[in-house]
Amino acid sequence: MQTPILQSFVAGTWLGSTPAQMLCDAATGEPVASTHAESPDFAAVVDYGRSAGVRNLLALDFQERAQRLKSLAKFLADHKEQLYRWSACTGATRADGWIDIEGGIGTLFSYASIGSNELPSGNVLHEGPAVPLGKKGHFVGTHILVPREGVAVHINAFNFPVWGLLEKFAPSFLAGMPCVVKPATSTAYLTEALVRLMLQWGGLPEGCLQLVIGSTGDLLDRLDGQDTVTFTGSAATAAMLRSNPNLISRGVPFNAEADSLNSAILAPDVAADDAEFDLFASEVVREMQVKAGQKCTAIRRVLVPRDRLDALQARLRDRLSALVVGDPRRADVQMGPLASKAQQADVRSRLESLRQSCRTVFEGAEVQSMSAAASDAGAFVAPTLLLCEQPLQADAVHEIEVFGPVATLLPYDDLDEALALAARGRGSLVTTIATRDPGIAAHAARRAAVHHGRILLLDAEAAAESTGHGSPLPYLKHGGPGRAGGGEELGGLRAVVHYLQRAAIQGSPTMVGAVVGEYIRGGRRIETEVHPFRRYFEDLRIGESLLTHRRTVSEADIVAFGGISGDYFYMHFDAIAAAQSPFGQRIAHGYFVLSAAAGLFVSPAPGPVLANYGLDTLRFVKPVRIGDTIRARLTCKRKIDRRKTDPQGRGQGVVAWDVEVRNQDDDLVASYDILTLVAKRETV
């Protein structure tokens, strides 16, 4: 059977028919695919992304792109077994592949949800609120975020061929920025299979995704300030790419997430018979086992109190000895090979360098079951546990990363020494602190946060639901300082913002409101004979407003509200205590003011407004006293068309209403936004 030739997908066509580098199965050494010899025209790649890609992505808005992401995620979930077949060739077990494949698909679902819930209709994200820049309210300022008009170049590592693409693609697609993806060559066959599936789905706008197999040639030399580069891989490669003269001279944003010497700290309060001790040992073994230790977040340095070293060492040896190593296609195998023979040679070389200053306390290669399962043709490296007895005097253990199933025990004498040792890694993606003591957690996390991008506080309570040391999550940032690259990925909406351009906007409330797509107080209002609550979503205009009739607050109102709510706080009922307060007399409940305002502005008959599902930015600005007269102004502030329907098939959108409650002196007493679901006129 002829070995398939991988192809690049550039400028809307598949390129590649001449074989170049042969790529082999990590377990068997048999040929899997080859790269292609043809070189893409990178000028055409960039031009295609900036023209067709930008144009077609921006023909959709944030909400529509979020819907596309969700549909894509569903399609990939339905066809994931095609990816699992290729995944085994990389050395990944089914469990390893789950992290890569279904973790990547899950990230698409997460960003679809983020887009639907946190982004507006349109392609302008208001980073508000607007702030007054003048005394009379005629001049305001705010910030907006808009899609860049360039391409996002994503350079990915070999260890997560699916997740690595999707976790970068999702936020850049949501932001409206076309991607040029360059996977690591050794496992590019899995990424190519993913891209073919994504294109087969049929919902990707033309130009939004291009794939480069092999070298990037002069691609980075063709970028400018509208483009961006994100990189995942080694710290050395990140430094080389970051120093590209064109990237520097043109101010091209460069975001790096690099491998690092991540640590795990067993705090001094944890005894050998505590649940946390066992959880800690399990975490260390899991990080050596999963993906055969080929994770940028894997634990490389294990910090343990010196008097618990022997106990932890014994626990780890027992668990490592029980691991089943072999071809990942076998159901009983728990750890497969490394991704390639080149990676195997690199791991062996770095391991030998570490052995110069460390003692081996577990050598998996000496376990008969492991050595028998690991064929010479495959890229196998057995799990290995080292011990550096004097880590304060050693340098190599804090500088050399073995990107495989290798970890080193570092004994320490007190917690501050452990934190100092962890910091010797010069910045990492993640550290774990296992402790039973909240005081230790608070002290250690504050110190560790300076040097580590994420901190897992591991105790028995968290363990039941914990996703573990090594798993980046869509809603939390992934990245770290120093050696870890100094960049950030994921983190919920933060990742989308990375692909948007921020600009400050100044002007009148009316003009700034027109730009951001929101009513800003002081701007022009639209007042008509029709109550705004009587308008369907499509008909409602931003700035449409209602000024209500007045209501005088009586003592009977306060007494009645107290009786209904059960709120008998002294400021509302104790005349003597209230007289001695800063207010000088009894005042109305804040929530009575809200309820009274609702009574003033609500149109009670059935109509397009379906539900009130929350309040934002609530502030009680000034007290309402007995005898004060209040009125409310309700103004349509913002509309978001989420393209959702009710069970009857009628469309609906979200409307945010600006509410001002003022007293008889026109002083603002309460201010807030109400969020409502509003029906559309037509059935979808």
Image (cartoon, helix red, strand yellow):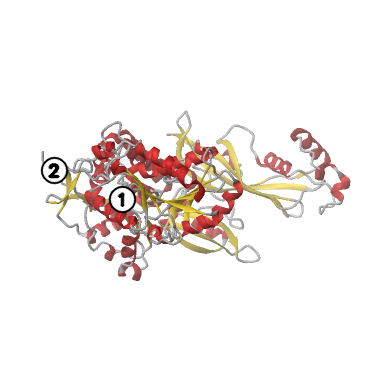
- 25 relative to 233, above or below: above
Disc 1: CA contacts within 10 A as few (<14), some (14-19) or many (>=20) = many
- 535 relative to 658, above or below: above
- 2 relative to 52, above or below: above
Q: Helix or strand or loop: what does disc 2 sit on?
A: loop
Q: Position of residue 149 (x, y in %)?
A: 36, 59
Separation of disc 1 and disc 2 at Cα? 29 Å
Q: Position of residue 660 (x, y in %)?
A: 66, 50
Q: Helix or strand or loop: what does disc 1 sit on?
A: loop
Identity of the residue drawn at 80% across and 48% down: 625
Which of these two is toward me, 29 or 230?
29
Q: Position of residue 376 (x, y in %)?
A: 19, 43
Which of these two is toward me, 341 or 637?
341
Pick the quarter of the image with the N terminus: top left
Q: Position of residue 303 (x, y in %)?
A: 47, 51
Residue 2: quadrant of the picture: top left
The first of marks 1 and 2 along the sequence is: 2
Amino acid at the residue labelled 2: Thr
Residue 199: quadrant of the picture: top left
**Residue holding disc 1:** 208
Pick the quarter of the image with the C terminus: top left
* Callout 1 touching callout 2 (CB < 8 Å): no
**Residue holding disc 2:** 3
Which of these two is toward me, 173 or 448?
448
Residue 146: quadrant of the picture: bottom left
Amino acid at the residue labelled 1: Cys
Disc 2: CA contacts within 10 A as few (<14), some (14-19) or many (>=20) = few
Tell which tag, 1 or 2, sits nearer the viewer.
2
Name of the residue lying farthest toward the top: 648
Please state the total of marks drawn on the protein image. 2
Q: Going by the image, does 485 lie left or right of 545?
A: left
Q: Is residue 371 visible?
A: yes
